[in-house]
Image (cartoon, helix red, strand yellow):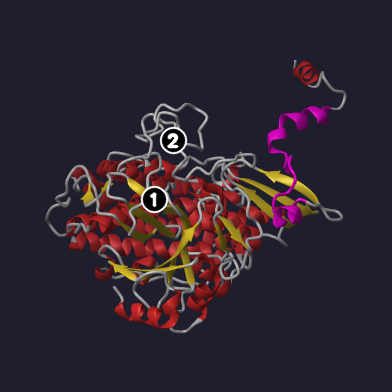
Amino acid sequence: MDRALKRRLEARFGERLLGPIRQRHDETEIRVAPGDVPEVMRALHDEPEFRFEALMDLCGVDTGSVMQTVYHLWSETTPDWLRVVADGLSRDDPRVPSVTFLWKGAEWQEREAYDMFGIAFEGNRDLRRIYMPADYTSFPLRKDFFLPDDAARSPGGGVRHLEQAHAPSNATPGAQVRKAPSS
Amino acid sequence: MSADLTTARHASSDDPRVMLEEEVGVFAPIPPYPPRTEREAEFYSLGDGEMFINMGPQHPSTHGVLRVVLKIEGERVVDLDPVLGYLHRGVEKLCENADYHHTIAYTDPLEYVSALFNEWAPVMAFEKLMDVEVPRRAEYIRVLSGELNRVASHALFMGWMALDLGGLTPILWSFIERDEIVDMLASLTGQRMLFNYFRIGGVNGDLNHEFMSRLGAWMSKATSQIEANQALLNENEIFVRRMRGLGTLDREAAFRLCMTGPNIRASGVPLDMRRAHPYSVYPDLEFDIPTRQEGDCLARYLVRLDEVKQSLRIIDQCLHDMPDGPIMAKLPRLMRPRPGRAYAAVEGPRGQYATYAISDGTDQPFRMRIHDPSFVHLQSVGLLTPGNLVADTMAIMASLDPIMGGVDK
């Protein structure tokens, strides 16, 4: 845990952060509103006290109640991973600004998050499906998408071949969507 | 006979080309729907003298099932559009519906030539979630088997690269090297390719006599054998001239493209997770991080060769320093980590393999993100290739060393 990084982040971003900075093992996590992503990322990338040059991973997360996009950054100024979570995207219409203006390599990772979660990255000029066919309509990694495989212990066990994007009829009411813990 | 068949085949049409188009219709270069994005609209409109050509999905030099639509003008590539998904299995979704131990078997076939690294990242992430201390001997065994896998993977890379450029001999030689390592790992793990060897908290089996004797025999001649293999290509003028100055990537562009592994080190950035973000017992081991400044295809190839030598150094030290002790931490069979999040990354032969795992307190991961270096590297083909010859597409792609099993997940 890099306490100095935590202090620097608090001093620089202060009121922009949603909730406290969490640190565990070798990870530091900050949460920001989706609209703040470009500005925060640019500051982290450009400013000499941070210099997070490398975007190591970009992914979407469906917590069951909201959507998130999660960025993992690496810098030689700290021994920690920095995790930036853009929190609170609505599940009905998840939107977040793209970071392709800083990292061109994020383009395909954003396409993947769009394909799997339906998150629209505003500013990504090639936001189309990447794995699934163009005429596919569901978003497979969402929590309300159930696997048909009976070997998987999903509430959708027994649902047949054509995968369904809504809760199957045999799902227990209230338990259809697996939800992440509130922390 | 053959004439009859030909006639029958085209019986429905006077023009043989019509039938042929129907047959390959699925893979027609131009998609049968209107463009969905700005970029797609730009790509699928032809300028003067330009044409589309389809490469793949069954093309031998795409290292798996990849389709690349090339827009060419004469012999030059103007632009290209990789089409993925032919190998997509939804591993992340499967992992969310399997318990923590099962996910290891699911991640194995992602990059099938370096399966140990696919296992390593999730296993490390779960250990962080559960606050497990891995026994030292297990860590040494992981590093030892991992570095062997790295040598095998780089050996194959060398052969494939030459094969993509039209040289057949190196792949035969590199398969000799690779098969010896793979057999060695089979005696350790029980499997030749998809090892399923790492466990949360340790490894599946201890070093055995057969593995050690095979390893000893191989180590005694490995250096000379690898050097002989390298002489096959490094001193080949056709190969070197073809690769030099092709697909050049500078330091800033490599960072912008989110590159990791040998591909970024060939552009002069000493970014190696084993040193940049140390894990396992790598801080105790001595090795260098080879880098090159040129950033072209030849540099990417040479960096990998230098890495093989460093891997041999690490294997030597592992054998020398291997401590005694248990190979597994004491853990319950059914794991229910406390709710939390963990990110772990390892340096594989292609770059950073990482896993971001979220636990919700049940025995299945709530979300398991698998970051694969091939996927990220493949998109830079679209930037490196335009302006080069069609045949150079294969050379550039081969120098980035993507494995489609990992790209498509």
Residue B368 marker: 1
Q: Position of residue B64 (x, y in %)?
A: 54, 43
Circle 1 sits in a helix, a strand or a loop, which is it? Answer: strand
Q: Amino acid at mark 1?
A: Met
The residue nearer to you, when weighing A136 against B275, is: A136
Residue A119 marker: none
The answer to whether any part of residue B22 appears in the image is yes
Q: Is residue B11 left or right of residue B86?
A: right
- Residue that appears at 36% across and 30% down: A151
The residue nearer to you, when weighing A88 against B202, is: A88
- Residue under pointer 2: A147
Q: Position of residue B164 (x, y in %)?
A: 59, 50
- The part of the chain drawn in magenta is B16-44
Can you say which quadrant of the picture contains the N terminus of chain B?
top right
Residue B138 figure quarter:
bottom left
Q: Position of residue B278 (x, y in %)?
A: 31, 68
